[in-house]
Structures are given as structure tokens and as C-alpha cells.
Image: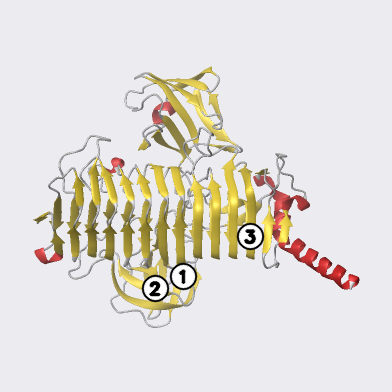
Amino acid sequence: MRLSLFLLLLCCSAVVSAQNVDVTKFGVTPNSFSDATEGVKKAIEACRGQSGATLVFPEGRYDFWPDKAEDQTYYITNSSSEEEVPVKKQRVGLLFNGLKNVKVEGNNSLFVFHGKMISWVLDGCENVRLQNIKVDYERPGMSEMTIKEIGPGSVTATIHPDSKFGIVNGVLQWYGDKWVSKHFFAILVNPAKGLNRYSSWSPFLKSKAEVIAPLTVRFTGDFSQFKAEPGEVLTIRDHIRDYIGAFVNRSKNISLHNVHMQYMHGLGIVSQFSENLHYDSVFTEPAKGSGRVIASSADGMHFSGCKGQITIENCRFKGLHDDAVNVHGTHLKITEVVSPTSMKIRFMHGQTYGFEAFIAGDTVAYVHPSSLQIFEKGVVKSVRLISEREMLVELAKPVPSQLAAGDVLENVTWTPALTIRNSRIEGTNTRGILITTRRKVLVENNVFYRTGMHAILIENDASGWFESGPVEDVTIRGNVFEECAYNSYPNNYVIHISPQNKEIIKGYWVHKNISIENNTFKVYDYPLLSAKSTSGLTFIGNKIIKTDFMKAGEKRPEIHLVSSTKARVRNNVFEPKQEAVVDAEKMGKRDINADLKVHLH
């Protein structure tokens, strides 16, 4: 009996040991400020093959340097061109490669990264959950300084302690661990008003800089065209996206919970060709008390070519140099029809190339780029990368006769359903959410606070960014839009449905079934909604409240529709009451049902 009990306890102990992998057992010491990279790498490897394993970080600070980090080659959407970054080999702090059924428990630990590196990567993983983690950089790639005094011939500013700088031959240079900023992009932040505006580092680059007190620099030069106010923060970064914040690649059933991304280089959390992603309580914002105002050099979350269900809920985005959330696919241009069943296709945008945009069995849409008209679909039989830019695609059946070089392909299989709810977006100079996916979309109970451009943009193009594709079922309800799009005047629509089709095909609409209902719009100006080439647009039961946040522009139509049909605009309440106008261009009376004044032309 005693022997049996002993063996049972021994067995249970082995199970607990197998399921909980403590990083401190691999030479990692929290709060030691030493490099945890190698020890954590061993701990991650110990989780391999252990179904249900939990990788445990006892609460504390963990530091990671690039010297012993994993080198990985990744071609990542919307990141960098061949000229900007010819070699795509990148350092990764925490690499989770091919893991299944693993949980990472951070216990609210702070992971601090040094130099330039991707903080964490989930590559080829399945059923992985990251939770209770804070991510930051010892020297963020963003430099920040607060304007103290400004005049036409000089500016005095205080430099944030995290923004390392030196003055060489009278010129201020921003630097970090093994890097120096060379290509400058600047945003001016007004923390009191929550405004982010485009600015310039050029007058500072041409001025003479001198330190006049600790972390205080006086710049002498021509500042007659530099617009700023004392108390505003000039934020400066290198515009080349050589790294990203975090990467989810070719993975499935991934969840993030209580993850604080306090700074991210480049493009934020990028999810590429991954399936079923649940991001709950992910906070892209500077650490409280840090005194910094920017948390990401570009987007907060970026999704390219994903499928299944993407859910973003209970999240916050504050302090971004680009969009909070972007969800899209990629149009590739047909450069040559090689045979009745094969063609060469090419990545067209400079920052997107090199990854497998199609795999065998995927359904593709054939699209005329000028009209964005989908004229047929096919199934991929095989695909082969010819170069970083080009692929040879073999189809299961002959391509349609109307397909020709210059047309584009969209991967229909890798398009996700999307839910964004109970989240807050603010502190960005650009857009809140970009949506281009044909599956069901729900944007519900969110707050969009003073986004610099459109709070929601639905686009689709095959000529610029080549971000696909059409939407077919979008519901936007119960949200609060407060004083958005101040950087987009005079077309400062809060919601902008703007497919980039240069040619309008009679009887064909790019987007379908977009419902905007029971939202609150707090606007300082007139524009609310614009939509082009959309069938089945409803704008119903919304409350529009006029504010005096900024001076309104000239009177313009509140709603602007172009080449759309089955539009319904009814039962919206304006406070104070006003005569609102719907401007309908290239439309007839049967195309719109509205209880507002309609101008047809």
C-alpha cells in the first residue's frame, strides 16, 4: 500500500514537473540585469513535445540582448524594401518555433530588449497562449523631446532620458545600441489635447545644437516654418522598418492575454498567414510613469493573409506613428500568362514581398485592377517562388479567357472573419482601423478618440499598397467616435469607404452590406461618412453631437456617396438639430432611401 502511494506521488510529481517549465531552472535570474537569452532559449526547448506545458517566468525583470539571440530570415509584409534592408535576417529575443499546446506565463514580468531585435516570434505554432507579459526596450527606436521655448531663430527642448543623443560638430544625433538614426520621420504630439500631427526634423538637422543644462538642448537656426507650442513633444524615428515589434507567422489558435507592448520597433505585432487569433487585453501604450508618449513606430496590430476568426477585445492603443489595426490581403500582379493553366505573378509594393502568398488548394480571385472587378475564381494546384518578387502559379483548370497580364490575383482562402470590440484607440496621427476582408466583420462598443485620420477606413486597391480585398458583411455599432480625422481636412470623414477603383463598371460594386448603426459621433466639423462603389450601405439610428473642439471648416455635406446603391440613411439624431445633407454622385433616386436632404448629381 505504501509502495503504491509512493509510486503514485512520484508519478504526479513527474507530471507537474513536465508541465511547468520554470526559466530559473535554466540559469535565468530575474532582476539581475544579465542576459537571459540563452537560458530562456533552453527553457523554451524544454517545452517541446510536452503537451500542456507552461513556460513560467517568476515575476521580475528579464533582459535580452541580440548577441546570443536567434537569427531568423523572415519576409514580413509592409516592412522594408530590398533597397532599404537587402538581407532579411533578423534577431529574435524569444523564438517559439513549432510549439504546440504551450502556455507562456509571465506573471506580469517585464521583458526588456536591448538593441534592435524582434521581441518575440510564434512561428509554425499551434494552441499557444502568451499572458501577463510587459515588453519594452532599454533604448526605444523612437526619440522624444519636449518643446520648452520656440522662436523663429531658436528652439529649446528637453530630451527624454531614454532618448540617447550626442552632438557632433554642432549637430544633434540620435543613437542606440549599434545604431544611429539616418532617415528621419517626425510627429508632433500634444499630450494635453491628444493630438498627433505631422512635423519635420529638417530644421533641427540644419541647426546648431548645444547642451545648456542636463538633457536640455538649444537649437539655433531657421525655425520660421516650424510650428509647435511649448509643452508639445516632438517624436522622431528612422522611417525604415528594419524590424517589427512581434511576429505571429504560419500559426494557428494563438491567444494573447494581458500583454503590454510598451514599445515596438517598426510595424508592431504582425500576424501573417495565421489562423484563429484571439487578442484580449493587449495594450499598446507607453508604460505608465515612463514620461514617453509613443509606443509603436508604426501600427499597433497588423494582419496580412490570415484566416479563421480574428478577435481583438478589451485592448488599448495609444501613442502610434501609424494605424492601430490593419487587416488585409495582398494583390499580386500577373506579369505573364505562361500557359493555359499557369502564370507568373509579382509582388508590387516595395515593402511587401518574399513570402508564399499562395499554397496548393487555395482559392484565388481574378481581378481587373482598374475596376477591382472580380470576374472569376480558380484553385491553385502548385506554386513556386522564382525570386523574392515573382512566383510561378499552376492552376487546377485553365485560366479564364479575359485574364491578361496586368490583372491581379487575391487569395480568397486566406481571408479572416474579424471582431473588434470593447477597445479604445487614441494617440495616432493616422487611422484607427483598416478593414479589407470579405468575411464577417463586427466593430462594436469601441472608443475612437481623436484619431488623426479616418477612424475606420475600408479601401481595397490594386495600384498603390496592393492591399486586398472587398468587404461583404460589415457591422459597425455601439461605438463612440470623438473628434476624429483632423489631419484629413477637408475630406475628414470619420468613416471612409474608399475602394481605389479608377473605372466604374455599371451594375458592379466593390463593397457590399456595410451597416453603421446606433453609434455616437462627436464631431467638430461636418463630414461623417463617405462611400464609393458600395451596395447595401445603411447609416441608421446614430447620434451626431457637434463639439467646439476645433474650428469647423466650410459647410460640406455630412454624407458623401459615389456610385453606390441600396443606401439607407434614416433615424439619425443631430444635436443641436441641423439640416444635414447627403451628397449623392453618379446615383439615381432609387439608389438611396433617406430622411435627410439629398443632392443628386
Earlier in the chain: of badge 3 and badge 1, it is 3
Q: Position of residue 49 (x, y in %)?
A: 70, 68
Q: Going 54% across and 47% down the picture, which residue do you hit?
A: 260
Q: Tag 2's secondary structure?
A: strand
Residue situated in front as seen by the camera: 355 or 10? 10
Residue placed under numbered mark 3 in the picture: 103
Quarter occupied by the N terminus: bottom right
Q: Pointers 3 and 1 in contact (CB under 8 A)?
A: no
Q: Position of residue 581 (x, y in %)?
A: 14, 51
Q: Going 10% across and 64% down the picture, which residue do you hit?
A: 588
Given the image, on which type of amino acid does mark 3 rest?
Lys
Given the image, on which type of amino acid does mark 1 rest?
Phe
Neighbor class of circle 3 (other Cα within 10 Å; few <14, some 14-19, many 20+) is many
Q: Nearer the viewer, mark 3 or mark 2?
A: 3
Residue placed under numbered mark 1 in the picture: 358
Q: Pointers 2 and 1 in contact (CB under 8 A)?
A: yes
Neighbor class of circle 2 (other Cα within 10 Å; few <14, some 14-19, many 20+) is many
Question: Would residue 147 appear left or right of 2 to someone viewing this image?
Answer: left
Residue, far top: 212
Residue, far bottom: 397
Residue situated in front as seen by the camera: 29 or 235? 29
Residue 470 versus residue 189 in the image, above or below: below
Q: How is the image coloured?
A: secondary structure
Given the image, on which type of amino acid does mark 2 rest?
Val
The alpha-carbon separation of the residues under discs 3 and 1 comes to: 30 Å
Q: Tag 3's secondary structure?
A: strand
Residue placed under numbered mark 2 in the picture: 364
Q: Position of residue 459 (x, y in %)?
A: 31, 58
